[in-house]
Amino acid sequence: MTRDVVSAYTLIVGDEHGPATVRVYGTAEEAWRALDRAVRGQTTLRMRSRRAVDPEATTKLADEWRAGNPEERFWQILSHQLAVRIPEIGRQRELAGSAARR
């Protein structure tokens, strides 16, 4: 079996209202957008439009939210590189598909 590496991003958000939530996303942009939505959902801020999320602005917003109750509020985005085993039959299909596109 061959291996491929895929990226995954874990978002953990917790506050005084219950247990932490943990979600996994396929792209960094999805994780940052989810953090932006989570923090805006906890405050009176309006939701952001569908344009790209700026990680620096989202970090600042999330840190300001956390500062309101630093003992119980937290957030974290973790990046993972996952080695995934690909059966040889899957690799053959992939190679046949790329040859057909040429």
Image (tube, rainbow, N blue to C red):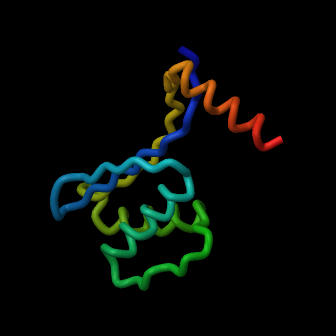
Based on the displayed image, in which of its 4 quarters is residue 5 positioned? top right
Please state which of residues 53 and 90 is positioned toward the viewer in this rendering.
90
The answer to which image quadrant residue 68 occupies is: bottom left
Find residue 42 and report its horizontal and vertical position in percent. 31, 73
Q: Residue at x 83, y 41 (%)?
A: 102
Residue 77 in the image: above or below residue 50: above
In the rendering, at what x and y percent does residue 93 appear? 61, 31
Furthest toward the top, the residue is: 1
Q: Is residue 7 left or right of residue 102?
A: left
Q: Which residue is pictured at 76% across the width and 39% down the height?
A: 100
In the shown orientation, is residue 73 left or right of residue 1? left
Give the left or right position of residue 4, taking residue 22 as reference.
Answer: right
| The residue positioned farthest toward the front in the image shown | 100
Asked whether 84 or 10 is in front, the reply is 84
Identity of the residue drawn at 50% across and 58% down:
30
Q: Position of residue 83 (x, y in %)?
A: 52, 25
**Residue 39 or residue 51, whichever sits in front:** 51
Number of numbered labels in the structure image = 0
Could you say where residue 96 lies in the image, as x and y percent from the top left?
69, 32
Q: Is residue 32 above or below residue 44?
A: above
Left or right: 84, with 14 as reference point: right
Q: Which residue shows up at 19% across the image and 62% down it?
A: 16
Give the residue at the far left of this rendering.
18
Placement of 76 over or under 5, stated as above or below: below
Between residue 34 and residue 88, name the one nearer to us: 88
